Image (spheres, grey):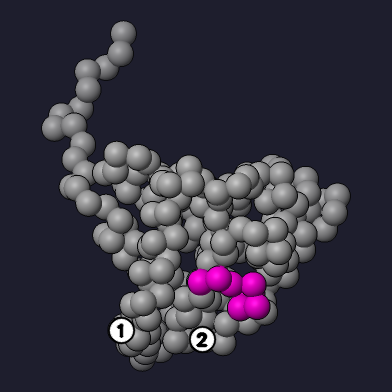
Amino acid sequence: MSLDIARAQQSLDDTMSAIASLNQSVLEQLAHLILGLQQTDGILWIMGNGGSSSTGSHLACDVGKGIGSSLDSPIRALSINEQAITQSAWANDFGFDDAMRNQLQQLVRPGDAVLAISGSGNSPNVVNAASWAQANGYPVAVLVGRNGGQISNFADIELRVDSTDMQVLENVHLVVVHWLFKALTHEPVTGPTQAPPPQA
């Protein structure tokens, strides 16, 4: 087996190009949406499939620990994908396409917001959840690819990555997560200088 170095390098080049073309104004809108959850005491509910699910969990961690620990009033973010048992129960009984929507119906409260991550923008389970959220008055932000997809119809804030290559999209979506971390974290986060003593 031989390595396809040229293809791998092209992916890196395309990733750098897509990062450079990100819409700064939309990035700031997304940051303000998250920051606004301080005032509403709301939760950012994040969802996606596969790699997008992983990106959502990464953002939830960064918001909850990194960003939250630097602010006087913490911001809460949770990925519904991490409730795998509940999600599988909904999917088993009512179908995978509506499992995320069913979860949101139970979980969201006034003041909350939704972030959907989808490379294609056409995954039925994510689209159906975003559609329900917007119809019921919850702000919906989406991270998608160049073409937007069906989910664009239900987005209050839409950040498109200028690519249709799934690995490039996922690379840049994670860069967006870290952009948000830098934009929203106002003080350096420091840990203990030494490990705590073992508990008896």
Q: Residue at x 51, y 86 (%)?
A: 146
Amino acid type of the residue tagged 2 in the rendering: Arg
The dot on residue 94 is none
- From the viewer's perspective, is residue 21 above or below residue 188? below
- From the viewer's perspective, is residue 52 above or below residue 23? above
**Coordinates of residue 98 in the picture (x, y in percent):** 77, 59
- From the viewer's perspective, is residue 45 above or below residue 71? below
Q: Residue at x 41, y 69 (%)?
A: 29
Which of the image's four quarters has the C terminus? top left
Residue at the farthest top position: 200
Q: Residue at x 61, y 78 (%)?
A: 152
Binning the other alpha carbons within 10 Å of mark 2 as few (below 14), some (14 to 19) or many (20 upward) gives: some
**Coordinates of residue 73 in the picture (x, y in percent):** 35, 40
Q: Which residue is drawn at 53% across and 67% down?
A: 141
The mark that comes first in sequence, 1 or 2, is: 1
Would residue 159 be found to the left or right of residue 15 on screen? right
Q: Quadrant of residue 199?
A: top left
Residue at image mark 1: 20
Residue at image mark 2: 146
Magenta residues, as a range?
A: 151-157
Binning the other alpha carbons within 10 Å of mark 1 as few (below 14), some (14 to 19) or many (20 upward) gives: few
**Coordinates of residue 43 in the picture (x, y in percent):** 52, 47
Q: What element carries label 1?
A: helix
Q: Distance between the residues labelled 1 and 2?
A: 14 Å
Residue at the farthest right position: 93
Amino acid type of the residue tagged 1 in the rendering: Ala
